Amino acid sequence: MRKTDYAAIGETLYESRLPNGLPVFVVPKPGYCKSFACFVTNYGGADRRFTLNGERKDTPAGVAHYLEHKMFDTPDGGNALMILDAAGANANAFTSETMTAYYFSCTQRFEEDLRTLLRFVSVPYYTQQSVDKERGIIGQELRMYEDDPDNAVYMELMRLLFAHSPLRDDVGGTVESIQLITPQVLYDCHKVFYHPSNMALCVVGDVDPELVERTAAEELTAEAAPLPGRDYGPAEGLDPVGKRNQRRMEVSAPLFMAGLKLGEDRHGPAGHRERLTAGLALKCLYGRSSPAYLDLYGRGLLNGTFGCSADYAAGEGFVVFGGESKDPDAAADALLAAAEKVAAEGFDPALFQRQKKASYGSSLRALGDFRNLGVSLAESCFAGYRTLDGFEIMNAITCEDASAWVREHIRPERTALSVVLPRREAGA
Amino acid sequence: MRRTRKEILPGAYLTCLRTDKFKTGLLSVSLLTRLSRETAAQNALIPSVLRRGTVRSPDLDALAARLDGLYGARLEPVARKKGEIQCVGFWADFVDEKYLPDGQGLLEDVAALLGEVLLEPRTRGGLLLSAYVDSEKEKLLEDIRARINDKISYSRYRLTELMCPAEDYAVDVLGTEEEAEAIGYVALTRRYHELLASSPVEIFYCGSASPDRVERAVRDALATLPRGELDMDLGTDIRMNTVEDGPRYFTDDMDVNQGKLAIGYRLGDAMEDPDMAALRVMNAVFGAGVSSKLFMNVREKLSLCYFASSALDLMKGVMAVISGIEVKDYDQALVEIGRQLRAVQEGDITDEELAAAKLGLVNDLLSAGDSAGALESFWLEQNLLGLEYGPDELAALVEDVTKEDVVRAAAGIACDAVYFLRGTGEDEDA
């Protein structure tokens, strides 16, 4: 395996690509009891339309998430979650717009658990009965999300921002769309997206990297496969579809989320630098120690629920920021005014330098979170870069880079605002 | 990982875990006080007000600039409920010096800042700033009102409140809206001085520095901590029996799609001389994790819910089951959850169930040793319970738990209250 030392941050990365196309990453963590492994497919809720061998496919919303639920069934009638749990491992999975990850952490019997993980994710087994039964469970899950105001305010924003992107739909689909999901649909999508060529295996812990590589080679097919072509429709453009939406729900205080599109997501190191620049610029602009946040916090227009991020999915980049506010419109206006000021004057260099120092500290801290590190190894692999290179790239980003990023991207006229208001007015 | 514990000031105990494996160090200071309806909101508010500004760094901007300069060190106010003890204070985490070009003395700087925030708040005429108090009070009120947003934790909160009407345990860690609204800056300043003078203090450090160095840094940082008559009788009343002979039933209606069923139990005789390992295994067999009876039966076999799980509070001797269900499934879910508990009490537990529960717990406990935050939380509870063993030793005790131990731990469990957050969302659509 290829070994890269990151001496300044005290980490080492081992990587290789198996003949079947599977990239394998291992970050050893000597002295830790816990080991973490994730087996991730480059397939998420947004990957609904694709081409394979020239043939176009269109699938219902929610297949990736449905697959996540059904992958745990094993052909002998067992359940992989139970098998891993019975072995003392903590196993789980998640589906995002861009990926589906299966993972476990354990303190003993790592190799055995890794074999279980590789096996259950690569061997599909769905029956009409098991697929029908899952529909009730997933339906309940979707209804739970519908009641969740944070989810609602986000989904409404996506529908304001995007005209036709699959990002408009919940990762899990809808109670209606999941009615269209059959065992055959699941088998077809598994075949296309769960081939090792389209996946990544990432391990963080006190384990032997060669053991990981060898185990993967033993458990998985040796053949490589063609990669599916993804179809997210035509590029979205930078203007939102709508400017504002509001709805009422059972919440105590109004919630808002504002956002704007960044345009096409670039693959590879250029995309990595773009992500890091965006992250640092947003930290300077709207982070916990930014002048804008502190001003609005002091005025009672924002509280600790406020957050912001630049996200990349389905070929698009976009920024979201929001939280609770007693006056969402005033908060959003003030936040955008702060961006206009930075666009005109640039960031204060002293502010930028200390944000950079703070970013270094928080990125270093994040390396202690095994799940976060494992998943970002996979995420960066799919996006064509190496997450651990980020520390060095970050060093080279200048105050002017961050100011220019704000000037180019954070435009009030391109911003959409989604608001959730309480059913009952305060004091009523 | 070596643990040391020492009283470094009257009633102030420093627990040090020395280890090289983390990239960040953690330092926390918790003031311990009785959880009560009268003071809970005030106590919860105090750290947030202190975090607004000190004599030297008078506002959030100045504090944020200092923390950024300390490589993004974090210093956060925290209020926790441990049984009937309210623990309020701060925790800080910061990059370990070996990863910094010029990081010598970061521990001392962070400890000093923590001490400064705790002991030298910005004041006017000796009183906490009314602007800071009002602004943080608004946020506390928002947090209290926001309890309703997360229907799962809201159900747990309502269950606790309804199940324990005559116990301090019913009090939420943030207090009530009424008490929070009544807070003024003069009374809060008085409460702040009382809290400093009368509270035992638990200090926790985890990181690469030697205990001697940590003790020096913390002693310097807390040199001016006033020590009056300390409330050393803090503790939690454990009620063995249910409030009435059978369970009490409560329902709230709310316009949501999914109902939440919350069931509260008293652990009973098992709390007389509690076998912590057996109780944890019992809970794992019953309702924690995917091999548990609740998950296997209520969710997997009967598809009655999206989730169903149980949680223990060993400081108070109670257990709660929370489940998300359709309104029409209420009766069936209630019966089924009761049936699963009886199975545990009657020893209807397979070797596989017991083994899976133990392995899962051992895994969780050993994993706790890999996280400074989990260790901090673990040791705060151990210190409050007067227990000396670490997560790895508790894991060894868990390994030895037998089915008979589990049955004994479950024998006295009695359902005290059933709470249903009834969704009315469907009715309106129909």
Image (cartoon, coloured by chain):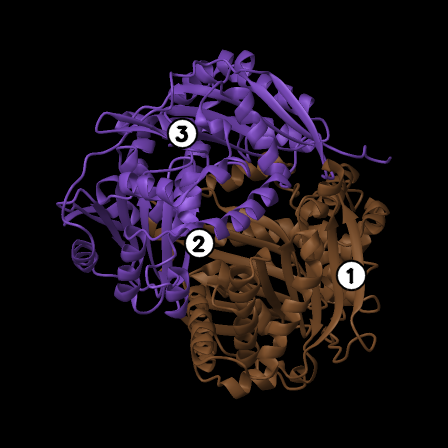
Chain colours: A purple, B brown
Q: Identify which residue, A394 or A301, lies in the foreground.
A: A301
- Residue A130: mark in rendering: 2
For disc 1, the marked residue is: B161
Residue A290: x %, y % from top left: 55, 30
Q: Is residue B55 visible?
A: yes
Q: For the C terminus of chain B, which image quadrant?
A: top right
Subunit that carries the residue with mark 2: A
Q: Is residue A188 above or below residue A48?
A: below
Residue type, numbered disc 3: Tyr
Alpha carbon separation for disc pair 3 and 2: 34 Å
Residue type, numbered disc 1: Glu
Q: Is residue A300 visible?
A: no
Q: Secondary structure at mark 1?
A: helix
Residue lying at 44% horizontally and 40% vertically, measured from the top left: A181
Subunit that carries the residue with mark 3: A
Residue lying at 60% horizontally and 34% vertically, measured from the top left: A152
For disc 3, the marked residue is: A312
